[in-house]
Image (cartoon, rainbow, N blue to C red):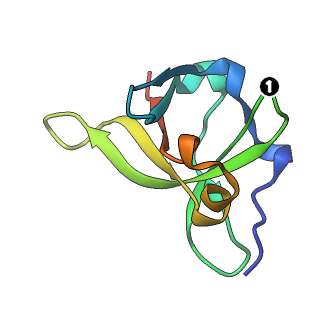
Amino acid sequence: MAIILNDTFAFLSERFTITTTQSGHTTMVSEASVIGYHGPLQIYDDACDVGIAVRSHKTGRTLRFYLSTEDRDDSGENVAGWWFKMIPEDRCRLSSQCREVDVLIIND
């Protein structure tokens, strides 16, 4: 199983608002129109998992995130936002202090 979601499709981290709690959990938030989000992409060559890639403007490192949930309005018809969690392969590469990273893209 090879990862096919690469730097070519990565969003720049500087386009996100990043908050970190005292416990070390980080959330990256951006509006779809700000980053040019048009839907998730396939992550692996032999699986149907979809997600996004984010490249750090500080380190140049790219991390991939899988689509975990969607926030919907009260009617259940419209998506208000998409939540992403880091794929295990990238999570293992990070120090224990920054392994809890989620991404929220708001459907504006």
Residue 17 in the image, given as x and y percentages of width and height: 54, 18
Q: Name the residue under label 1.
A: 57
Q: Is residue 61 above or below residue 26?
A: below
Q: Which of 101 and 14 is in front in this view?
A: 101
The amino acid pointed to by label 1 is His
Q: Where is residue 55 in the image (x, y as percent from the top left)?
A: 76, 37
Quadrant of the drawing holding the N terminus: bottom right
Foreground pick, 40 / 104 = 104
- Front residue of this view, candidates 43 and 64: 64
**Image position of 108 with respect to 60: above or below:** above
Left or right of 104: which side holds 52? Answer: right
Going by the image, does 88 lie left or right of 81?
right
Relative image position of residue 70 (x, y in whole percent):
35, 46
- Closer-to-camera residue (4/95): 95
> In the displayed structure, does residue 105 sit left or right of residue 5?
left
Residue for point 59% across, 22% down: 16
Q: What's the residue at 80%, 42% (across, down)?
A: 61
Residue located at (53% from left, 23% from top): 30
The local secondary structure at tag 1 comes to loop
Position of 47 relative to 90 (above/below): below
Tell me if mark 1 has few (under 14), some (14-19) or many (20+) residues whose alpha carbon lies within 10 angstroms of its own.
Answer: few
Give the residue furthest to the left: 74
Could you say which quadrant of the image residue 11 lies in?
top right
